[in-house]
Amino acid sequence: MAATKVSDHILQRLREWGVEHVFAYAGDGINGLLAAWGRADNKPKFVQSRHEEMSAFQAVGYAKFSGKVGVCAATSGPGAIHLLNGLYDAKLDHVPVVALVGQTNRSAMGGSYQQEVDLQNLFKDVASDFCETAMVPEQLPNLIDRAIRTAYAKRTVTAVILPADVQELDYSPPSRAFKMVPSSLGMGSYAPVPSDDDLQRAADVLNAGEKVAVLIGQGARGARAEVERLADVLGAGVAKALLGKDVLPDDLPYVTGSIGLLGTRPSYELMQDCDTLLMIGSSFPYTQFMPELDQARAVQIDIDPHMIGLRYPFEVNLVGDAHETLKRLLPRLHRKESRAWREKVEKNVERWWEVMQRRAAVDADPINPEYVVHALDGKLPEDSILCADSGSAANWYARHLRLRGRMRGSLSGTLATMGPGVPYAIGAKFAHPDRPAIALVGDGAMQMNGMMEMVTAAKYWREWSDPRLIVAVLNNRDLNQVTWEMRAMSGAPQFEESQAIPDLPYAEIAHRIGLDGVRVEKPEDVESAWDRALAADRPFVLDFRTDPAVPPIPPHATFDQIEAAAAAVLKGDSDRTSVVKQGFKAKVQEFLPGGRHRHDRPGADAHDSTEQST
């Protein structure tokens, strides 16, 4: 019987940890691993992307939607470098991902050899909690065990660097000897909880408030029932950071939706008017969208003591798991008899959805992108998994889609990088092959990498029990989010050389690689196109020709600010006439029926971040 190689043992250990997929791209720096995959009957499954960055994004999407660790692998040098953007996406969004990275032979290290990169230093930041190089077989299985255990425990990125010659060595386990490190599988489940004294202090603050606002993030995902009970007891409204969009259903009347630059007006109003704030499982960074610093008494719940107390002067900081902490907090809360605050919140929410419907109905040339996404809302299958790319597509995902029931959704919340929409959806399909995945992407992201990852979808879709992977391209031939940021924040007209991009036949390309798709150029064809995609028997690309002049207006924009943006456009923007027209048409929807809202006043907070809400 052939000896077990180090590479064989690594794949065996991954299987023992329950790893079923490794998102990877081949290269001679991992030849030993590739040979071991051949001997292991492709278990765990090697999922081949078109680019290592896409492998990392697929691992992130898989981890976000499965709750399991995502594993990616790449060769030495350029392959390892390519992983970095996707790994940073995982780190900043607190997602457990393990990277297995090849390296040149030990004998060549330090010799300026081909494809030799100092991976220990390269990965020092992105995998700061655990990044180690295997130099002898006896370091295993400890390196694999600690990489996976640390990724889970700290919800972060870890890396194991594997010199090519070490992969080919015969495996010998650590012994019971000096300076050997045996290891074991698994990790116990645990849920930290705050002290009783801290819980009572928090309850006192929340009980004293008359107008309670709750802000939840992805850390509250396991506490949906408890958040609903708390909102009922306190008569609170609940806003959601974008990474927490799927934590609480949007069809609850007191859920105000997303918060921040891409957020809703009811969330902005909730924070402007509250006297008490409870933040659960979120590191939402934009203080300007929270109450004034002396306005509200505030409590934070977070599982990570290093992330507690950030963003706002919290009076009580509760370190603990959201589910277990809320279970212990709820019995200490008193039901608020007055429902006036809740009724006001619900009225604002109801009005907002009417506004969204009206904004989606505004005429555009040729198609209003808000209508494209709004038309999907009522058609979403109850088990949908939604992914949005960065850019203006994220605006419409945040504002027009009401996630409900079992629906899941995510995007690059903190890094806000271009390009993860399609690979996230592919990762989701490997996590849940029986559920439909839908990606909303701009044409810039589709050209950057999404189109080539449709080749990956073409390679694997027959393995999925539900073959539906729908990619909706908002094709406006413009890098639209940056265009609007230039207009609104820099007072500069569009710089066409940087912003204009080619018009590609996305649906036609999909056909050429064995998938399906349709180009949509008229508003009256939007709904039937969604119906066709949702009924398709294979991945489907929707090429929507949308109007770049529809503005992603922030939730607190005033008429004065829109006028300022319009003035900048008139300085020389190639799209000046339609921009001014669409800007006023879109904003006026917020004021029908009735006059100017009381928060729309000169001098209202106008300072935005160009990054995405998290």
Image (cartoon, helix red, strand yellow):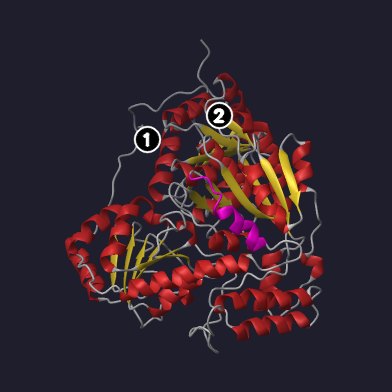
Q: Residue visible at 21% across and 64% down?
A: 199
**For residue 381: magenta?**
yes
Residue 517 sits in which quadrant? top right
| 1 or 2: mark nearer the eye | 2
Residue position marked by numbered label 1 in the rendering: 179
Front residue of 99 and 329 = 329
Left or right relative to 509: residue 171: left
Chain part drawn in magenta: 369-382
In the image, is 168 to the left or to the right of 570?
A: left
User: Which residue is labeled 2 in the image?
Assistant: 45
Amino acid bearing label 1: Lys
CA–CA distance in space, label 1 to label 2: 34 Å
Which image quarter: residue 546? bottom right
**At label 2, which amino acid type do we have?**
Lys
Give how far across and how far down residue 123 sits, in percent.
55, 50
Residue at (66%, 68%) from the top-left corner?
362
Q: In this orientation, does residue 127 appear?
A: no
Q: SS class of the residue under badge 2?
A: strand
Q: Which x, y percent locates residue 113?
A: 69, 40
Instruction: State whether residue 297 is above or below residue 150.
Output: below
